[in-house]
Amino acid sequence: MTRATLVTTMLYDEIDDPGELTPEELRAQYVEELAEMVASVGVDEVAMQTELDRETVASLADGDSPEITLEDAAAVLATGEDAPSKDAILLEVRDHLLMGMTTGVLDVDTLASDIDSDLGPKAIQQKIEGRAPMTLEEYALVHHYIAERNDR
């Protein structure tokens, strides 16, 4: 697998059995992957290429779990050598969520009622479609629920 393919799929395919993890464990794995990317590219370079401040990027490099969005995560991943663009990564991640919802016969009303969040159906739909920012924590909740539902 090329590094570009790994970058594109790490937010969903590279994690074994996401439905068997907790959303917190899933988010921790995303942060671990982001930390590895920052370590390979460098804190200053990632900060320069993204809209993230240096403090947030350094926090990721240290393995901390700062509050970042899915868009921020994609921007970090896009800094890798031969990596697809941030937009390409986001499109693939969102497509994966929508395909998972189709496979699991899920709608946003079900997601809103079953995940541990205050998000309503409209907010979830906007976040999945990219019309509103989605935090990495929210993404972990949604990704986990869809994977868990599809594992049944």
Image: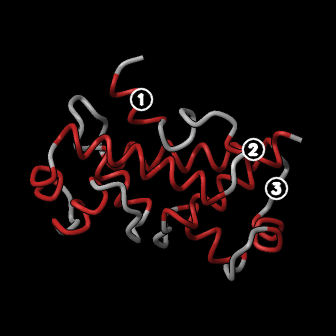
Residue at 59 percent of width and 51 percent of height: 26
- Asked whether 63 or 95 is in front, the reply is 63
Indicate which disc, 3 or 1, sits on the residue closer to the N terminus.
1
- Asked whether 130 or 138 is in front, the reply is 138
Query: Quadrant location of residue 110?
Result: bottom right
User: Circle 1 — which element?
Assistant: helix
Q: Which residue is mark 2?
A: 20
Residue at 20 percent of width and 58 percent of height: 50
Indicate which disc, 1 or 2, sits on the residue closer to the N terminus.
1
Label 1 to label 2, Cα distance in Å? 21 Å
Residue at 69 percent of width and 48 percent of height: 21
Figure colour scheme: secondary structure
Q: Which residue is mark 1?
A: 6
User: Circle 3 — which element?
Assistant: loop
Could you tell me the amino acid type at mark 1? Leu
Note whether 70 is above or below 101 in the view shown: below
Q: Position of residue 91 (x, y in %)?
A: 47, 47
Could you tell me the amino acid type at mark 2? Glu
Label 2 to label 3, Cα distance in Å? 18 Å
Residue at 23 percent of width and 42 percent of height: 39
Furthest toward the right, the residue is 152
Report the quarter where the C terminus lies: top right
Label 3 to label 1, Cα distance in Å? 27 Å
Indicate which disc, 2 or 3, sits on the residue closer to the N terminus.
2
Could you tell me the amino acid type at mark 3? Leu
Give the foreground label among 1 and 2. Answer: 2
Q: Are marks 2 and 3 in contact (CB under 8 Å)?
A: no
Q: Which residue is mark 3?
A: 106
User: Circle 2 — which element?
Assistant: helix
